[in-house]
Image (cartoon, helix red, strand yellow):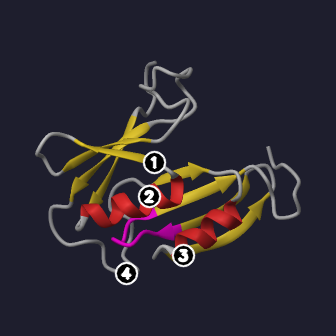
Amino acid sequence: MANLVVHFEIHASEPQRLVDFYSELLGWQFTQFGDYPYWMIQTGEGSIGNTDASPGLGINGGLTQRQGEPPAPGAPVNGCNIVVGVDDADAVFARAVELGATEAVPLDDTEGVGRTASLIDPDGNVFGIISPVMSDGTRAM
């Protein structure tokens, strides 16, 4: 398991707001770590650390209290961002906007990659989505 990314973290000014957002949008489960302002994120089957499935298909993460101001609109990414594999990029994109996200990069098909987009969550964090299914229904990968 050398050199694999095995955990991610999302920083939140209002943690409960992002717990609600990602739970509703992606079905992730959040568990607060004791009394600390930190929540473990269970992303689902196949994630590293999930004993119910073979690891390697995804990773779990955490949500932590942001230290300082959220990113300003239009500011460059400061740190890493995540890209989430989804079945239907158009449906997830639309639902994210309904839940308070804004478009960062519009939905687009890229041959050999898939249907992708980037969004800004309700606390200013950029995240991407990718589906192997293109807008015409063909598979990119």
Left or right of residue 46: residue 70: left
Residue 56 image offset from top left, x and y in percent? 54, 26
Residue 57 image offset from top left, x and y in percent? 58, 31
Which amino acid is tagged 3?
A: Val
- Asked if residue 22 is positioned above or below residue 72 in the image, the reply reads above
Q: Which residue is mark 2?
A: 22
Left or right of residue 22: residue 13: left
Alpha carbon of mark 4 to alpha carbon of mark 2: how far? 20 Å
Q: Which residue is mark 3?
A: 97
Q: Nearer the viewer, mark 4 or mark 2?
A: 2
Q: SS at mark 4?
A: loop
Which amino acid is tagged 2?
A: Tyr
Marks 1 and 2 close (CB-CB < 8 Å): yes
Q: Who's the residue at 41% across and 25% down the image? A: 49
Q: Specify whether residue 40 is in view.
A: yes
- Sooner in the amino-acid sequence: mark 3 or mark 1: 1
Q: Which residue is mark 4?
A: 73
Q: Quadrant of the C terminus?
A: top right
Q: SS at mark 3?
A: helix
**Start and end of the magenta stretch?**
119-126
- Sooner in the amino-acid sequence: mark 1 or mark 2: 2
Which amino acid is tagged 4?
A: Pro
- Sooner in the amino-acid sequence: mark 4 or mark 1: 1
Alpha carbon of mark 4 to alpha carbon of mark 1: how far? 26 Å
- Asked if residue 113 is positioned above or below residue 66 in the image, the reply reads above
Alpha carbon of mark 3 to alpha carbon of mark 2: how far? 12 Å
- Sooner in the amino-acid sequence: mark 3 or mark 2: 2
Q: Local crowd at mark 3 within 10 Å, few (<14), some, or many (≥20)?
A: some
Q: Main secondary structure of the magenta part?
A: loop
